[in-house]
Amino acid sequence: MSKILRGLQPDVVAQFAVTMIQWQKQYGRHELPWQNTRDPYRVWLSEIMLQQTQVSTVLDYFPRFLREFPDVKALAEASQDEVLGLWSGLGYYSRARNMHQCAQDVMRRFGGSFPEEPIDLQSLPGIGRSTAAAIAAFCFGKRAAILDGNVKRVLTRVLGYSADLSIAASERVLWDLADQLLPTDDLASAMPSYTQALMDLGSSACLPRNADCLICPVNKLCAAAQEGDPLRFPVKTRKLKRSSEAIWLLCLTNSHGEVWLEKRPPKGVWASLYCFPIFGTAEALALALPEGLACHHDASFVHVLTHKDLHLHPVRAVWNGEEQPQTGIQGSWMSRQQWHILGLPAPIRKLLDGV
């Protein structure tokens, strides 16, 4: 507990936000396309895209989304396939599904305008406490703390907070500390700058495997820097349990260059995306093949998800008949022009590019 009390010394509480805001104005990022705006739609869109995704990747997708869906109404009126198709390649597709549902809820529940209060924002699909706080702070100057992975690292180091963040109670304490460090004056101006400062520091000087304390604006306030061991924060002992799954893919093409694709169920691996028919065993795939159809087993490979390794076994076959293949599986023939704009898992798109 002494670590926590040290972090809440009056000089830290008084100086931290002020110092961060001054640093951000001079050295922080100001050129990103979702900055310098109070438009909740753009801020929300960027926040969802930036979850688990690097800024460099989002810089490519963000303008394309705005061109196709310039406002929340356009996004709400789009089909899920259109949204997933444009999202294709960003990964973590539940974000896109939640984003589409969120846009529809904003139209239905809030008349097309994002609510200002964090608690109302949190009631929308895909918006957690930190994302709600970011939207409220950037767009409405609300005094709300963000606490994503980067910010947890910055704050635990500054405060010397060594409690195990894999324990929910420890994280709740950190939320409380984050609230206490928020600016108290001129919130309309201070909150956007302060929130951006935390993000910028966590993505520049205060990195997971490197802490460049010499250029950190709050190094004199930072308990971890004073102790000389910033890399031991944050503390999170519980490891994610990884699993694995073997999947056989029926890569069926026809003489017209079309491929047979099915839409996955709304839950499970690659939910709501388009995919080659998948099977749990090679025997199950063989039973689904039309009688007499020759097939070729490509080299298997591993596709790594956050909590699971997928061992993929592509099986290629060519259907020369004019009628639909009697495979006993759902799906339809699709041309390159058709599948190119669909929501496709990354390894499936890679296999299709080789057709």
Image (cartoon, rainbow, N blue to C red):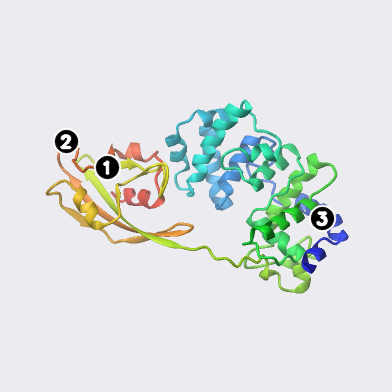
Disc 1 designates what residue?
Answer: 260
How crowded pointer 2 is (Cα within 10 Å; few <14, some 14-19, many 20+) is rated as few
Viewer-nearest residue: 342 or 160: 160
- The x, y position of residue 20, in whole percent, is 78, 54
Alpha carbon distance from label 1 to label 2: 13 Å
Give, as a three-letter code, the residue at label 1: Trp
| In this view, 20 is above or below 83 | below
Is disc 3 placed on a helix, strand or loop? helix
Is disc 1 placed on a helix, strand or loop? strand
Q: Earlier in the sequence, mark 1 or mark 2?
A: 1
Q: Residue at x 76, y 56 (%)?
A: 177
Q: Earlier in the sequence, mark 1 or mark 3?
A: 3
Alpha carbon distance from label 2 to label 3: 71 Å
Is any part of residue 318 visible from this angle? yes
Is disc 2 placed on a helix, strand or loop? loop
Disc 3 designates what residue?
Answer: 19
Q: Looking at this rendering, what residue extends furthest in the front direction?
A: 169
Q: Is residue 134 left or right of residue 51?
A: right
Image quadrant containing the N terminus: bottom right
How crowded pointer 1 is (Cα within 10 Å; few <14, some 14-19, many 20+) is rated as many
Whether tag 1 and tag 2 are in contact, CB under 8 A, the answer is: no
Give, as a three-letter code, the residue at label 3: Thr
- The x, y position of residue 204, in whole percent, is 67, 59
Viewer-nearest residue: 161 or 32: 161
How crowded pointer 3 is (Cα within 10 Å; few <14, some 14-19, many 20+) is rated as some
Give, as a three-letter code, the residue at label 2: Glu
Number of numbered discs on residues? 3
Q: Looking at this rendering, what residue extends furthest in the left direction?
A: 292
For marks 1 and 3, give the one nearer the viewer.
Answer: 1
- The x, y position of residue 17, in whole percent, is 80, 53
Q: Which mark is residue 323?
A: 2
For marks 2 and 3, give the one nearer the viewer.
Answer: 2
